[in-house]
Image (cartoon, rainbow, N blue to C red):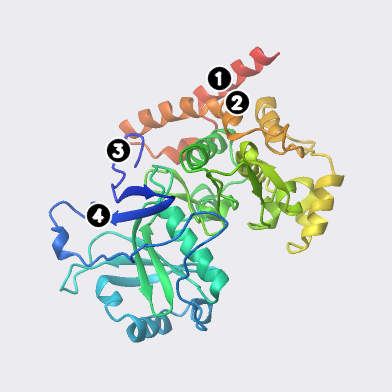
Amino acid sequence: MAMIVDNQPKILEEQSDNNIIQKKLKNDFFPKNVKESSLIIKEIPMNSSKINNETSSKLISSPKIYKDIRNDKKELEEYLKQNNPEFLEKFELIDFLKNGSAGSVMKARPKLKGTKTSLNRFVALKFLNNGNTKKNTQNHDEIIIHGSLKHKNIPSIYGYYKIGNNSCIAMEMDIYGDLDSFKKKVIKRSPLSETLICYILGGLVDAVYYIHTHNKIIHMDIKQQNILVDDYINIKLTDYSVSVCYKNLKKIELPMVGTCYYMSPEVLRKQTISASDASRIDVYSIGVLLYLLAFCDYPYKLKDVNNKDYSQILKNIEKYELEFPQECENSKIFLNLIKNCLNKDIKNRYSIYQLMKDPFYQGYQVILNEKEKLYNAGKFVVDLMVDNILNFNQYIKQKEKEVK
């Protein structure tokens, strides 16, 4: 999981047949002294669909959606008792972590089979609001897509469950929550140092590179709330509910999905793009995130716009030139990276492959080397990342001299 302690659980085995991914659940994330037969973890059979804009299978449609009972643990438990009483024998529900239109995420502990004993491990249970056929299909695609991913910077899936007319994903839980919560509860300072921004960027880019290179997937919704931080301060990209797979496609018809402040001009226009430019959609969102982390604001004056007025956001992007605060003291290398990520012209914007060659991103390795030293010395990494790490400062200064 961590760079030093690589204990990433091996959960899924993947097989592919005509773009249909079958997954076999393992229980390796539990303590080794617990026999697999003593655990009740069961996946929903995934006999279905193509991971694409089309879905050949249908799950279940339902008039009951979870947003009616979110934030109410007792009501959720009552719903579970009525629709899948065995579920509460598998998990001890603890508390809600997050709620949204797509569903709710709850902190839970898995139980030993046939007992009321909960393991000393936490999992995140994502209850999906199926609601209607469209939402049903979308949730099914999320299960298929996320279940196909196996990477140290992506949360692992432990199982899939049918609950009445809805569904639930059990996944790895990251102790510090999303990036926004991590900043408020742990960092407690803003804007962030370039060291910490580069570290966040490094883990995020590794995940994005993986999904584009190995799975041909556009995430479509990169933002603070979809970036998690685990026990070892590793960065993990989650929430594939609106992701688009472009495998075997030469052209991609972009849907207008995601979070409006982070959407690229092409998404706001619902353009058709070349598959070779697919990663540039996610790179634009990364650029927005970098700007936000560095300046506590959105680029192109987006903060002044109604967050549902997509046409006005597009006008702002087209009208305004990218500017940085006058008092900005950030390195030129960092500012140049943001410019290349937020280029309005998709052909001139960084791809994920170009981003990985950028000198600011390559400073990530300097930070990883320092992180290892800090862990070995028993120090808490974040304490030093809040301020720029000396070696990283020296690296940036050297690179700026080379550019001159």
Horizontal side of 367 relative to 162 (left or right) equals right
Inspect the image, locate mark 4, and give the three-letter code of the amino acid beneath it: Lys
SS type, badge 3: loop
x then y, percent, for residue 329: 70, 31
Q: Residue beneath label 1, please?
A: 394
Above-or-below relation of 334 to 56 = above
Q: Depth check: 177 or 80 in front?
A: 80
Quick one: quadrant of the N terminus? top left
CA separation in Å, label 1 and label 2: 17 Å
CA separation in Å, label 4 and label 2: 38 Å
Which dot marks residue 5? 3
CA separation in Å, label 3 and label 4: 21 Å
> Can residue 176 be seen at all in this image of the molecule?
no
Above-or-below relation of 339 to 305 = above
Label 1: how many Cα within 10 Å (few below 14, some 14–19, many 20+): few
Label 3: how many Cα within 10 Å (few below 14, some 14–19, many 20+): few
Q: Depth check: 173 or 256 in front?
A: 256
Label 2: how many Cα within 10 Å (few below 14, some 14–19, many 20+): some
Q: Depth check: 49 or 64 in front?
A: 49
| Mark before the other along the chain sequence, 3 or 4 | 3
CA separation in Å, label 3 and label 1: 27 Å
Q: Residue beneath label 2, please?
A: 358
| Mark before the other along the chain sequence, 1 or 4 | 4
> Can residue 113 be seen at all in this image of the molecule?
yes
Inspect the image, locate mark 1, and give the three-letter code of the amino acid beneath it: Gln
SS type, badge 2: loop
| Residue at 43 percent of width and 60 percent of height | 143
Above-or-below relation of 123 to 384 = below
Inspect the image, locate mark 3, and give the three-letter code of the amino acid beneath it: Val
x then y, percent, for residue 192: 59, 41
- Locate residue 113: give its quadrant: bottom left
SS type, badge 1: helix
